[in-house]
Image (cartoon, rainbow, N blue to C red):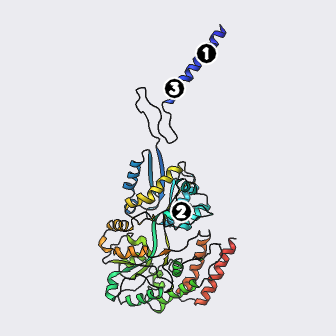
Amino acid sequence: MRNRWSILSVVMLVGFLLLAACSGGENNSSSDGTDTGNDDNGGDSSTEEEITLRFVHWVNEESGNWEPVIEKYEEQNPGINIESMPLVENMNTADYYKQLDLMASAGEDLDIVMFSNGSDLAKRVNAGLLEPLNPFLDDEGIDINEEYLNGYPAINEEYFGIPMKQVAMLVMLNKDHLDEAGLEIPTEWTWEEYREYAQQLTTDDHYGSYLHVWHDLHSLVKFFGKPEGDNRIIKEDGTSNADDPLVRESLELRYALENEDQSSVPFSDILSQQMDYRQQFFTEAASMVPIGSYMLSEWGQFTPDFEIAWAPWPQNEETDSMHGFVGGDALSIAKSSEHKQEAYEFIRWMSTEGIMEQEVWVPSWKGAELDTAVENVASNTPKPEAIHTESFIHSVSSFEPIEVYADAPYITEAHTEYSTEVEKYLLGDQDLDTTMQNVKERIQNVVESNQ
């Protein structure tokens, strides 16, 4: 009797397991999340796996026009949901990176991370936040430097960002002021000619030029037209570049504009009045600002009452070939993401078809139709007729990008030390020789303390 019940128990257990297996088989899914089971009538009872990708950035909906673009992607890719997460309300990237680091340190889920420059991306690579993209690019057969105007160099031979928005360094000009002074829109010029333009544009009502408190840009302007070689205050090998003659020449030029010619807003006024570059340009207090091409549409609260013209970045010498800096925003994959392939597919789409649909920024994608992209961006500004699109298109397409390399982790510290000495010089508290000597010592101390 005991044996009979044992056999019966085994039979019942096997039957139960078979029933459970058959029941579970109806929900079997393939590796791509597609249900492979069919009902008894031969109909497809498939349900796709829902995946949500958390996309962090600093651009609000009003400025970024994210919703319709993401909606289109989700329609084309059922089962993929993109959660757009602007981490700050003020669109300030410094504040954004603080929030990003807090999220990362707290172990919050991240999939896609947006960056505004290579230095801040490199810091998060060093912190272990980002996933290398080489395997994804290789699988797709993509050469990132052929596909994009790429301002994000490899770090230890690995790429960590797909370029999205193109930002070229140009000069933004008030065309009405040019016309009043009888000046043409420059199509190719030098810094000496920029200085002459600033003098001729200066009147009792406005300055010809404005250079902001960004000493890593406006107090190093000649680095951004250097055709090749090291073009930062820290060299590619991590050593000081303060001995480069272009550092001294950049400071001499700025000092001459502000203090000798009095054709550019004095640095003392910029500090004491806490001036903003948008305010200075759009209120017509200054005629020219060397700035990124993002100003094609990013006007803040201002709407110009004049036409905005554009010129290429001035060359250091008349015999120099046309070169300039190209950077912009990039999209990266978080190392902690559980859906890296899906994240990669989104950032590839967003940096090509998506950014064209967005009609907010000029893409870094070389496959984009530049004229169409610029016209689309201009048409979405509050006043499209204020943009001289012909000069913009010429300016962003008239030069070769300068060489880029990954910044040393201590580049921000070096810029801080540089700025301290530069401000003493611009305010008249020390001469240029003293400034350069102090700059060299300070930068060298930064390098040595980080070895």
The amino acid pointed to by label 2 is Lys
* Foreground of the two, 441 or 163: 163
Which residue is identified by label 1? 9
Measure the alpha-carbon separation of dots 3 and 2: 52 Å
Neighbours of disc 1 within 10 Å: few (<14), some (14-19), many (20+): few
- Residue at 39% x, 65% y is 369
Q: Position of residue 86 (x, y in %)?
A: 45, 58
**Quarter in which the N terminus is drawn:** top right
The amino acid pointed to by label 3 is Cys
The answer to whether 417 is drawn above or below residue 112 in the figure is below
User: Which secondary structure lies at badge 3?
Assistant: helix
- Residue at 61% x, 86% y is 436
* Foreground of the two, 193 or 10: 193
Q: Are marks 3 and 2 in contact (CB under 8 Å)?
A: no
The amino acid pointed to by label 1 is Ser
Mark toward the viewer: 3 or 1 = 3
Which residue is identified by label 3? 22
Which residue is identified by label 2? 98
Q: Are marks 1 and 2 in contact (CB under 8 Å)?
A: no
